[in-house]
Amino acid sequence: MNAETLLESETMPEMILRNGTVMTPGGALVADVAIDSGRIVAVGPDLEAGEDTRQLDCTGMWIGPGFVDVHTHLREPGAEYKEDIESGSRAAAAGGYTAVVAMPNTQPATDSGDLVRYVIKRGSEAGLVEVAVAGCLTVGRAGQRLVGFDDLWAAGVRMFSDDGDVLADAGLLRTAMDEIAHRGGVVSQHAIDPALAGTGHIHEGAVSEALGVAGIPAAAETVIVARDIELVRLTGCAYHLQHTSAAGTLPLIGRAKADGLPVTAEVTPHHLAFTDADVASQDTSYKMMPPLRTETDRRALIEGLRSGAIDIVATDHAPHADHEKDVPFEQAPNGIIGIEWAAAVVNDIVGLDPIRFFEVMSVAPARLGQFENQGRWLEEGESANIVVFDPNEATVVESSVSKSSNAPYLGRRYDGAVRLTMLAGTLTYDATAAPA
């Protein structure tokens, strides 16, 4: 139903988003978006509304495909005290997300089809975001024996990772890549060389030296990336680099892309926003893996996201309970939460135009995760998986709907705010509704 036929229809849409900047296949244009029965039924100017049609003025706001996160830790099964699938889904919806890929470093690790189906079922029951699952590369993420790829593939896995650990055995990784390549899947690599990382906790440099804390050199990332790219040449397997942190990684990725290799890379909001100078406080909210690196690295990551050298923003949302982080820095676990504020941080720090913003937040991650109905430019007939984002309204980070609060964003202000999130036409987050 196009804008003209909508006017002639006997039924009016359930909702119309008015006067926003709409991300369509032809580019960004100011228009209305009409939604009914879970789908977009029209995009155009001055769409007619019925008596019961809810209308929302989106002047100055961006209306685009819901965000997609290919790197979310939902902690279920096994660590539900930190986060569970329902609470993590709620946080994702508040952040404008309509789909996430749950990472497999759960307890037990997601290395079987039964566990994959459990997570997907729990996500469906929560009904707030579409939950897909990254399956392990090795049994128990132990790096010793490959998983049953047929079993995981049949359960719906398209991304494979031992996230939290690199698959250090190059021969085993080559075999895994061969297996995954002919199925059409993706290896998603946690690229930190364990021998170079050693017992390090932060970036190896001036701050680590001043604090007397063991550091992790940027080479721990670049060495693995360089090795893995050569394995991509051998196997043809699609390869995705998680949480890029080092400036030296970008030329490696760039050359691989120039050679036509199927290589993509993500960056997290926290690596765009913070540096190892923030770690000098020894606040454990700044402890993550890979560690925050230098201002030079941070600026290179920003430019890489602007230029296309980096394809995707992924949150690496990693909840931990307060008692786990409220310990001396070197004893604290790695990881922070941030899925609720990722869009605001990216908008504020990087300053992308709306099309590029939705490419890195929605379209490219949906393509990588092989989501059929996510990350699609808005047009008639598409599933109404939509976010309304105001690039000018401020987000002041005061609290989280996650079970955990381990976030360096708390107390900070960022330009940009999610106003509404919609999954298949159902509102999953609405900041526009009047308070009761």
Image: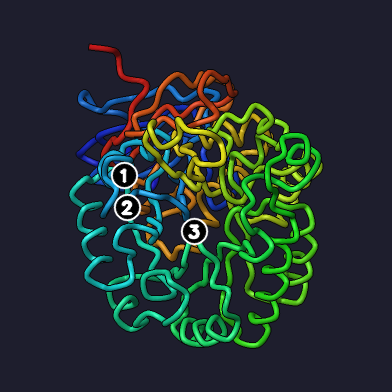
Q: Earlier in the sequence, mark 1 or mark 2?
A: 2
Which residue in the protein does label 1 denote?
Answer: 423
The residue type indicated by label 1 comes to Leu
Q: Position of residue 303 (x, y in %)?
A: 76, 45
Circle 3: element type: loop
The residue type indicated by label 3 comes to Gly
Q: Choose between 99 and 87: the one closer to the eye.
A: 87
Q: Choose between 432 and 43: the one closer to the eye.
A: 432
Which residue in the protein does label 3 denote?
Answer: 164
Please name which of the two marks, 1 or 2, marks the residue nearer to the observer: 2
Q: Are marks 1 and 2 in contact (CB under 8 Å)?
A: yes
Give the crowd class for mark 1: few <14, some 14-19, many >=20 residues within 10 Å. many
Q: Quadrant of residue 274?
A: top right
Q: Quadrant of residue 236?
A: bottom right
Residue drawn 41% across and 22% down? Answer: 399
Q: Earlier in the sequence, mark 3 or mark 1?
A: 3
Q: Quadrant of residue 386?
A: top left
Q: Check the picture and name the quadrant holding the C terminus.
A: top left
Which mark, residue 130?
2
The residue type indicated by label 2 comes to Glu
Circle 2: element type: strand
Q: Earlier in the sequence, mark 2 or mark 3?
A: 2
Residue 359 in sight from this viewpoint: no
Q: Position of residue 262 (x, y in %)?
A: 63, 74
Give the crowd class for mark 2: few <14, some 14-19, many >=20 residues within 10 Å. many
